[in-house]
Every structure is written in structure tokens, then in C-alpha cells.
Amino acid sequence: MTTHFTHLHEHEPRTLVDLVDRAIELKRNPPRDAPLAGKSVTLVFLNPSLRTRASMEIAAASLGATPVVLAPGKDAWAMEHLEGVVMDGGAAEHAREAVGVLARYGQVIGLRAFPSAASWEEDCAEPMLTAFRRYSDVPVVNLESATCHPCQALADLMTVKERMEPAGKTFLVTWAPHVKALPMAVPHSAAEIAAAAGMNVTIARPEGYDLAPEAMDRIQSLCAESGASLKVTADAAAAYEGAHVVYAKSWMSLESYGAPPPSDEETRRTWIVDGEKMRKTDNGIFMHCLPVRRNLVVADEVIDSEASVVLDQAENRLHTAKAVLLWLCG
Amino acid sequence: MTTHFTHLHEHEPRTLVDLVDRAIELKRNPPRDAPLAGKSVTLVFLNPSLRTRASMEIAAASLGATPVVLAPGKDAWAMEHLEGVVMDGGAAEHAREAVGVLARYGQVIGLRAFPSAASWEEDCAEPMLTAFRRYSDVPVVNLESATCHPCQALADLMTVKERMEPAGKTFLVTWAPHVKALPMAVPHSAAEIAAAAGMNVTIARPEGYDLAPEAMDRIQSLCAESGASLKVTADAAAAYEGAHVVYAKSWMSLESYGAPPPSDEETRRTWIVDGEKMRKTDNGIFMHCLPVRRNLVVADEVIDSEASVVLDQAENRLHTAKAVLLWLCG
Amino acid sequence: MTTHFTHLHEHEPRTLVDLVDRAIELKRNPPRDAPLAGKSVTLVFLNPSLRTRASMEIAAASLGATPVVLAPGKDAWAMEHLEGVVMDGGAAEHAREAVGVLARYGQVIGLRAFPSAASWEEDCAEPMLTAFRRYSDVPVVNLESATCHPCQALADLMTVKERMEPAGKTFLVTWAPHVKALPMAVPHSAAEIAAAAGMNVTIARPEGYDLAPEAMDRIQSLCAESGASLKVTADAAAAYEGAHVVYAKSWMSLESYGAPPPSDEETRRTWIVDGEKMRKTDNGIFMHCLPVRRNLVVADEVIDSEASVVLDQAENRLHTAKAVLLWLCG
């Protein structure tokens, strides 16, 4: 049975916390002896990336492995994932062959496949990621899919742990304004890993912007397990009261799936993370996975303040990527 | 005199077989001592690639060399190859300078340049590859041109040798349905290397889909040298009788050059590689260079069967790439 | 105070010459002991590149560092550089975060950001490069901006030094015909470093094609310091008299900024570097940064002659890149 790292909920909370602790150790003492020498990591990007690609490439290389980056549809062949179809359309290659080949070339396969934003039913089945898992006999790492961004989640928890003991603290995930319809992977994963670490979770979002029910069920279970609370509110400002972490992210509504959120001033003012809201927190830190749109998602005064740990989160992508690679192919 | 690896026919059959034997040895014992440390390999792609790029990058890195991938027209400058022209059109750089520079930076230069599919006369002159050879004083490796795909051919022969002693066996190259007009490089090269290894070669194709006359002459000579037979037929099904290898590939017609093949059901049914046809073979293996369109070129039942060695072929690209790099710059 | 390598004029002439001398030594004795092992270099390209990218990638890898290449707007997120704006337009990420993150991942950040060619006032402020410097606490290397191409300049001086003792010799920068409106970075930098090395500088250009006043002031000062002369002329042919170096480059006019130069035969014939003009020089060498349009900028007879050192210039990009990386993060 191949171990994949595609969804947080497939792993015990203990495993996730151990990975984070390993990453903290790797940050202190980067390995110098090329433990993955002679190995390769193939990273498949169907969507843009800065942190995920750079951190994975550098993590692999720093451990002695060779990273190879592929962009099917651009520098490589567009891929089909449905089984049994007559491939007389746009895709020149089936994921079954592409993945089968990459599994011969490398010890780990990464995939970034964003949702199409056309149908949640289809997106939440994550057809390309599912195909990669099905066809790969080496570990698959999810570099962000429709429902989960597990590598980001590890870096998020690591960043929290660098600032506080998570258990019992309050982790606010707040919806934020945007101009595009964005995936839910990050808020899902951030809330899940916070819950897994024993934090009280608050989700603040406008009516109609609930996270996916499956994710909410998982967050609820994790909170229940650790005796933490889970709260959902539409009161943007009140949600900040007593929060130790404010994690901002825009995401699209399952009720108007694929549509950008409202762009009126009222929505923007209500939901932006600004200094006034941050002052309600219990000396809370500000988190975001990046890229972030300044003065739409978060005001300059917050992201540029001492409370902002967004660069630590990004840096910790590197250390957690090393931990994941060592775990999967070390 | 610089040794290039651009066309099979420039090398003795013995040289090709030796490279394959070296690759078999490298598969068993991958070198650990970075024999190409301090060297670089520049890979120029004018067309998409998955296996060729990944295998060359990983092969180079695993031998200690630095691979650099360039995509002129995208991340680098579009290139002119004609001599003496006033360069006031779309190309910002002449191949003479591009190649001259790459020859200063690296010990091997790879080039993928597909045919334009506008004129066979022009395509078969392989103007860009010819320019690369002309201007390079380091070895040039053909990563697939209009007429030849020599790296694929080495992996193909290696895969055959892993399953059988080639001499005297029957190697069927069968044309296959498709939705696009595809190059002839792979069928040329597969048939040439099979003939070079002493196999009886059968080419099955619809009338009007002959391989290029120059390639047929070479295949004929190689067969004659080793006492093997060469047969050409339009009887798709009968061609499978007694075959030990079935190598499928679509290619365009020289008579309607650049046009996609007929898409009627009759053509598709007649030429697809399916289980019924495979059962006529002498326990034959199924080969394809990939990417392959399932249920158009080959039925799922065949490519997913034990007879299919397509992933071995792809994997062997890595080992033969190492053999080629060590030969050219070791 | 972080040392950046973005503009020649921020460094003492002595520093520039030392870097060149270091590169000459590195060309003779390439380091074999991976002095930059465990380090990374992130290279951000907003425009195409062949030499700059390949030389930087190979230089970094040959020193043991990991190069990572990013193309925001293509494989990574389009970037905003203005401060205080509401980011509800096309850019998903602010340079402040992108640079902040890259500074966590690597020890050096490179940026190629060509001018927009819409407004010289805006271009000469080099907003993206300025943002990178502002936000980075690791060295930023300019991989060509609107006003300067310092890495090219080092390779240029190195190439001159390989052929002659520069001091007191005559360095002609001649404008050349083209079909596009091109940046002034290269002529600025070539003239500046020649002046810094004590060469007499001649700028030959049509009326209306003066280099930027700020650059001319710097070149004038450098010439004055070393007792060398600076001459500007519109007499294309006479300018070659006695020149030891002919450096050709097209650039756009500040008076018709963004417009391609005249394409009439008279302009082309007058300004192309051809054999007749070269024969007026004092056995002068021909230089160009590449890519170059043959028979528009320079006649085949010149670039293909013994006098042409364009491939040496390109090769020396590699050696000077090593010197720069060792200086900045060694």
C-alpha cells in the first residue's frame, strides 16, 4: 500500500504533528549529507505556483534529489483522466501513462490541479488527483487540489507552533473579499490542521459561503476529539474577539459556484482584515497562504505589522517540504 | 570531427547495440560517482515533451551534470536557421549564435524540432537540426526531428532485448488511427533499429501511408545485411500473424502531407490495435513510444494487458539517455 | 546594508575590474568544491532570455547552489509593485511578498524586467527592480532592466581584457538598425564599463538617438576620472576610424519613445556594421551582447570574421556570473 500525502484526513493528527516537529528540527539543522541522492521528484503543475514550486524544488535539491517540473498542456502533453474513453479530443496522453512513466522516473510525484470552478460535484471528486493516486505506485503529494492543500497546512501549523502552544488557543478562519472565485482548499486545510492540533476553530464567512460539508464534518470531529470548540459565524467583526490566530482567505460560494464574490464597498469593508478588527484579538497573529491581494483581503497596516507571519508561513513551506520528502522517500 | 547522435543511420548497427547493452548495465548498476560532474547539457525544445525532457534531465543530473532546458519562442528567443538572410522578421536570434553559445555553456546540446507538416520536402531536410549540427562543435542529440527519434529507438531495442533475443523475430510496425497529422520519426526509427538488430520487419499501413522512401531504403539494406525479411502490407489484421512485437504509431501520409488521417469508423476499427488482432501474434508484446491516445490507437484491453511494455520503454529512455550522455561526453 | 548588483554606478570602478579579474581566474580554474553548497539562487524572468538564464543556472549549479527559475505571469503569479493600492486588478501578488518569500528561499534574487517602452519617465524609474531592491534583504542581481545590464557589462570588459589592455584604447558604441524599439540598458552599460576601464568612448548614433542624459553624465565622469575622452557623433562611418572595439546595438529614441526605428534602406545601409566600416578601425574587434539580427545590425562578413568576439562575450557571461555569485553569497 503506497502512502500518499494528498489529504490531511487520511493521516492521524499525530502523524501531521510529527511531520511539523520534524520540519522544525530540519529548520534548525538542515541536512548536509544528501539523504535523497540518486532520487528524483517530478512536480506536475496544471496551475501557476511560486512558493509551492520553489519550496519543493529547493527542498528536493537540498536533500540531494533531482526535481523535474512539468506543465502539461504547456511544455508537456494535455492529459485525459476519464477511463474507457476514446481519446479523440484535445488530450494527447492519458494520466495512466503519464503517471506510470513518472513513477518510473522518480520516487515521488507532486500534482497541482486547481478546481475547474464549473461544478462543485465534479471538482470535489478531484478527478486528476484521484487518477494520479490510482495510477501511481510511488507516493503522490497534493500540491493543492479542489479540497485540500496539505503541504500548506503543515507550514501553517509549524508557523503557529513557532509562536504559541496551539492547544486551547483560538484559530479564526475568516473569509475575505476578492475579485475572483477561489478554491476552498486552503481554508479547509488550515481549519483541519488547527483542529487536529487542538485549537478552537472559528469560521467567519458571509451567509452562503459555508465550507464544504465534508470538510466541516472533519473539522467538527477533530475538534470533538480534542475537546476544542467549532463555531461558525457571519459576524465578521465579532469573530475576532479573543482570537490568537487570524487566517484570512477568500473562497467561492457553493451556492453560486464559480461566480466571483460581491464587489460592493460594504462587503469589502466588512470582510477585509484591518487594524480595527485585529485589535479585538488576543494579540493575534495574521496568517495567509499567499499570494494575497493587499487592501482587498488584508490592509497594508496588518500585513506589514509585527503580527503578520505570512513570510514565516512561506519559509516554512521549505522545511515542511523536506520533512514530507524524507518521510515519503527517505 | 564531432560525433553527433541525430540519426541512427550514421552509426554502425554495432554501435547502437553497444549503447543498448551499456544502458542495460546502467539500469542494473546506476553510477553513483558523478562521472559528468562539472559538465552541462542544454536541451532545446521547440515542441512539447514529457518523457524526453524528464529522462534527459534526470539522466544528466544523476551523472552529475547540470541540465538546462530552453524553449525558444517561449522563454528564449525565436530562431532563424536560413543563412544569409536579412533578419527583419520574427526571429530575434540566428541558430548560429544560439548554438555557438550553447556549445560554450555545455558539453552536449539536445534539440527537439518537429516537422512543420507543411511540406515534406522542407521537413525532411530538417533545417533546424541541420543548422544545429552545422554550428555546434559539441555533440548534438536529436530529441525527435521530422525523420528520426534515435533516443526512442535505443529504448525500444532495449525493451525488446529485455523480453527476447531480437534476431530472427518479427517486428510489426502498424499504422494507427489518430485525429492529427503526426510525424514519421518514430516508425522510421523503430523499424530501423529492429532491422539493425536482425529482426524481420513488417510495415502495415493503409495505401498511401508509406514511410519515407529514404527510410525504407535504409530498413531494406539493414534487413538484407542481417538476412532478415522486410514486408509491407495494407492488410491490417493479417500483418499480426506470428509477430513477436507489435509497435503501433500513427503517421501522416506523404500523399496528403499535413492532413489528419480519415476519421471514419471503418478506418478506426480496421487499424486500432485490439485484443482480437493481438491474439494472432506469437505471444507478441505491445509497444508504443507514448503519448498514446487510448481506444483510438490502442484498445484499453491491450495497453492494460501483460503484453504491454510501454512503461518499460519509457523507463528505458532514462537508462539509454545515460548511455548516450556518457558516450558523447564521458 | 545589503549589497545589490543592479547598477554599475553603485560600485567603484575598482570593484568592477576586480570582479572581471576574478572571472578570468575562474575561467582558468573552475572551482570543484561546491563553495555555494546548500544555497539557492532564484531567478525571476519577466522577459525571454537565453544567455542570462543559462549562464546563471549553470554558474549557480557549478558552484553547488540550486537555481530556481520563475516566470511570473506565466508559471507564477503576475506581480504588483505600486504601494498602497487596492489590488483588485490583474496582479495576484505584490512584489513585497514575492520578494520577501524568495529572500527566505535563496541567498540571491535575480530579476529581468525590460522597460514597457510606453513612457521613459516610468521606465527609467525601473519600478519592478526598485521594488525588488526595496523588499529584499538578500542581494538582488539585475538581469537587465530599462537602464542597465551590469552582468553583460562584466562579460564585455572581460572579453576586451582577453584581447587588449583596455586603458587608452577606443571603444565605439554604434547604434544599429532594427525592426523593434529596443532598451538602452546594454549601450549604457557597455559604455560605462569601458569608461570605467579607462577607454576612450565614442557613441555613434543618428540625431535623436542619444543615450539617456543620466547615463551620459556617468560616462562623462568616468572618462574624466581616467583622463579618457568621450565623443558623440552622427557620422556612422567616420566613427570607426581608429576604433579598437566596435560594440553594436540598436536602441530606441527618447524623442519617439517606444517607436521602432526607421526601416528605410538608407538608414539600414548607413548604420549596419559591415566590412567596409570595420576596415577603418585599428584592427578592431566586433562585439554584441546577442541575440543579434544578422544583416540588419551586422553583416555576416563581420560577425563571421576573426574580429568577432560575440561568442567569447556570451561564454564570459558564465564566468562573470560565477564571480558575481561568489562575491554576493560566497
Image (cartoon, coloured by chain):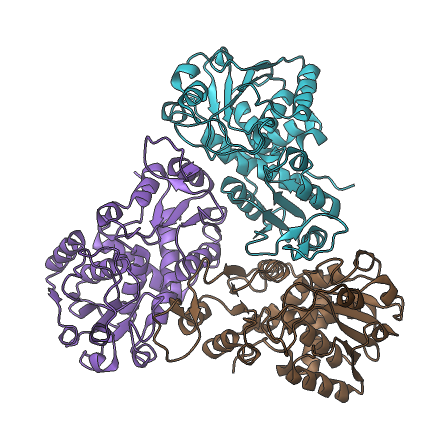
Chain colours: A brown, B purple, C cyan
The picture places residue B2, in percent across and down from the top left corner, at: 32, 40
Residue for point 50% across, 74% down: A128
- Where is residue B169 drawn, in percent x and y? 17, 70
Compared with residue B325, is residue C277 higher up or lower down, i.e. above or below? above
Task: Estimate the x, y position of residue A155 in percent, counting from the top left.
Answer: 70, 68
Q: Residue at x 73, y 68 (%)?
A: A176
Q: Tell me where residue B165 sits by quadrant.
A: bottom left
Image quadrant occupied by the N terminus of chain B: top left
**Residue A55 % position (x, y):** 63, 60
**Up-down: is C43 above or below B163?**
above
Please give the count of numbered marks on the rendered protein: 0
Measured along the vertical axis of the image, is residue C96 above or below residue C225?
below
Front residue of A49 and A168: A49
Q: Nearer the viewer, residue A260 or A97?
A: A260
Q: Residue at x 60, y 28 (%)?
A: C254
Report the side of C4 relative to B215 (left or right): right
